Amino acid sequence: MADFFAENWGNLASVFGLVFSFLAFVFAKSASTAAREARDTAMRQSLSEDMHGASRSAQEIVTYLRDNKSEMALLRIGDLMNQASYLSARWEAMLSEKSRNNLREGAAELRSMHGVLAKGVRSEVAEKRKARLDKAAQRVSSIFNEERGTAAKAAEVRGE
Amino acid sequence: MADEQTIKFLNGVLSKTREGRIPWKPTAEESNFIAAIGGQYVLSISAVDEQDSWGNTARHYALILRDRDDELTTVTDSDDGIVKELYERARRKALNVDEKIGGVLEVLSRL
């Protein structure tokens, strides 16, 4: 036995070296996969938080309009327009076409609301116009709520 | 006069609108409708009433294509009369006019 080791120690060392190299490769690969998955999970979580913030702003607009606080609604609309631009630019690559369309539509709807409200903020907003604004705010809120749900679902599915 | 590509664009939007493939939506403005397509572009169609110096009111129609905040192109009814047809079709789709009239017809048939 001792003679065998003495005569073949070089070959055995090569075999062990090969086995260790293979194991190191396997561990490195699984570590890299785990790191990538952790990064993806963190990104999905971050997207979910961003959508949550936008959805909350949209709901605040609905409330301000309902309470006839036009100037506060106008400020929040401006904020949400900025948030929508940020969301589109930051998460474009991760979002589906439907979500990107939703965000574009939400931003366009906010632009229209901003225009209407900016014209009428000093005077009393006519009843008909107010009803349309309320409906528009509700649509925007639904859009951001839907996107919040989609993002939260994606974060949960990946987190399981 | 609109260039060839703009006319192609207008005809494309009209044809897809006729097929009901463009998801036109209402906005906070009574005579403005929007549709987001391709995850990138927003179509916006509006009607604007203008009064001339004689006090006569004329209605003008405009289709705008936007990419984020950039206005890529605008087609007005002076470029082509079909913008008015597009506006009317977009309005009907956005407000679900056909479905609602269908509902009214059903009610009428029961009277």
Image (tube, coloured by chain):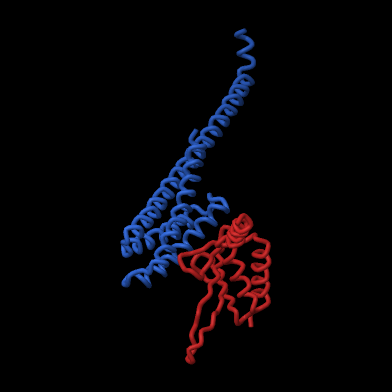
Chain colours: A blue, B red
Q: How many marks?
A: 0
Find residue A154 and report its horizontal and vertical position in percent.
Answer: 51, 41
Residue A11: quarter of image = top right
Looking at the rendered image, the quarter that the N terminus of chain A falls into is: top right
Q: Residue at x 49, y 52 (%)?
A: A91
Percent of width and height locating residue A20: 57, 25
- Compare residues B81 and B110 and report the one nearer the observer: B110
Which sits in the foreground, A145 or B47? B47
Farthest bottom residue?
B54
Residue farthest to the front, as pictured: B111
Front residue of A45 and B99 = B99
Q: Is residue B73 left or right of residue A155?
A: right
Q: Can the viewer see residue B63? A: yes
Question: Residue A44 at what x, y percent from top left?
Answer: 47, 44
- Relative to residue A84, is residue B71 drawn left or right? right
The answer to whether any part of residue B37 appears in the image is no
Q: Quadrant of residue B63?
A: bottom right
Question: In terms of depth relative to the viewer, which is nearer, A75 or A63?
Answer: A63
Q: Is residue A5 above or below residue B85?
A: above
Residue B66 against residue A140 in the figure, above or below: below
Residue at 61%, 59% in the rendered image: B108
Q: Residue at x 59, y 22 (%)?
A: A16
Q: Position of residue B101 (x, y in %)?
A: 60, 61
**Farthest-out residue, top:** A1
With B42 as the anchor, is A127 left or right in this view? left
